[in-house]
Structures are given as C-alpha cells and as structure tokens.
Amino acid sequence: QVQLQESGPGLVKPSESLSLTCTVSGGSISSYYWSWMRQPPGEGLEWIGYIHYTGSTNYNPSFKNRVTISVDTSKHHFSLNLSSVTAADTAVYYCARDRWGGYFDSWGRGTLVTVSS
Amino acid sequence: QSALTQPASVSGSPGQSITISCTGTSSDVGRYNHVSWYEQHPGKAPNLIIYDVINRPSGVSNRFSGSKSGNTASLTISGLQAEDEADYYCCAYTTIDTYVFGTGTRVTVL
C-alpha cells in the first residue's frame, strides 16, 4: 500500500515562495504520475499540476507561471514550488498518486500552509 | 478552467437514496469517461470512491454508484448511513490534459 507524506514550512511570507515535498513510501515512484492539489480553509479542492516520474509536467492554467513541480526518483519524492504567494494561497496542500487521465487513488494527509507576514 | 457545478448540499434519511450531480462541459465531463468521485470527512484527506464514471475501488461499499449522461455525471448513495455524512467532490480530466474538481456537496444524514 503506497503512502504519501507532505512536508515543508507551515508559514510563508507574502511575495515569497512556497516549497513542499511529498515523500512516497511502500511503493515505487516510477511508472506513475503524481499530482498536487490544495484546499483553502472551508473551500473546495483545486488541482495544481502533475509530474511523471520521467519529469514531464502539466499545470493548472490558473497558476500561470508561478508553479513548478519536480521529481527526484532517487529520493522517492516530488516537490512543489509556488512563487509570489499571497494570502489567497493559504490552504491545505495535498499530494496524490495520479492514475494519469483518470483519478487520484492515494493521497497524503495534507499540510496546512499559511501565507502571512 | 471553471469548477464543475455541484449542489452545495444534499440530505436524506437513513436508508434512503440520494443523488449528487456534477455538471461540466463538452471539454471535460462530456468528453471522456474519466470522471471520479471523492469522499472527504472533516479534517481528513479525500478518498477515492468512484473512478472512470462507474468503477469502485476495492473496499468501497457497493452502496456508491456512478453514472454519466452528456455533460453531467452523478453519484448515487443507496441505503444512506450516518457514516456517509461528508463532503463529496467530483473530478474530471479535460481536453487540455488537466483536471478540474467540482464545487463540492455536503451530504447530511437527517
């Protein structure tokens, strides 16, 4: 049973970058796609983007050029970087295994990131 | 990309059946049979309950079923139980190789 665990700072200052890592255990990071989602407090889910273990990516157009997702297969993790954050980026961030073109079958527990000075 | 449209809330009595709709466009829900549904209890991560419109992952109750007609997908919960009280989200794959989630539905068991 694959398990995912998000990690990173819980507090980020406005205009700075948010960086999170998702560590995959109990299964291979290879042969799969991996996605990041977020959920602002009291609101719905939003897909941010995906990465394939080969490094190919695609992102939600809503994030324009602010988002970068990367993968390090040797460390069994993939990462999210979101630049120029504002209070609107305050959310619980989730990582998930992406059965590409279909669905997300394993999720991390999520990590709350607050953007505040 | 705009979020898929779901009713904000649906309620039912124990044992009843309820249906949650998820309306998109011909570029997402209507284009592919790649619609999934997630159940989310307060403070918890979402959990996959339906994928590819009609399929249930192993371990998910057969009281959950999915369907699709045109640009609208639906999730039906039969034999409603207290444990079904949660938020439910649909999600669709799109023609630009992205995903879009629904606005979410709060299910209340009366």
Image (tube, coloured by chain):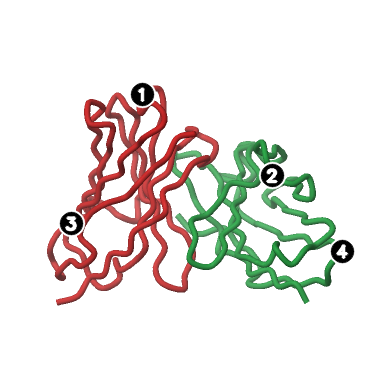
Colour of the chain lettered B = green
Residue farthest right in this picture: B15
Marks 1 and 3 share the same chain: yes
Q: Chain of mark 1?
A: A
Compared with B36, A116 (above or below) is below
B36 relative position to B44: left or right: right
Going by the numbered disc 2, the residue's amino acid type is: Val
What's the distance in space between the residues labelled 2 and 1, CA to CA?
A: 26 Å
What's the distance in space between the residues labelled 2 and 3, CA to CA?
A: 38 Å
Going by the numbered disc 3, the residue's amino acid type is: Ser
Marks 1 and 4 share the same chain: no
How far across and how far down the image is residue B60, in percent? Answer: 69, 44
Q: Report the residue at 34% width, 59% height from top.
A: A111
Residue tagged by mark 2?
B60
Going by the numbered disc 1, the residue's amino acid type is: Ser
Q: Which mark is residue A30?
A: 1
Going by the numbered disc 4, the residue's amino acid type is: Gly
Work out whether residue B33 or residue B49 is closer to the camera in this orientation and state it.
B49
Q: Are marks 4 and 3 in contact (CB under 8 Å)?
A: no
Q: Which mark is residue B15?
A: 4
Q: Secondary structure at mark 3?
A: loop
How far across and how far down the image is residue B26, in percent? Answer: 61, 46
Colour of the chain lettered A = red
Q: Which mark is residue A83?
A: 3
Q: Are marks 4 and 2 in contact (CB under 8 Å)?
A: no
Q: Chain of mark 4?
A: B
Which image quarter: residue B6? bottom right
Comes first in the chain, label 1 or label 3: 1
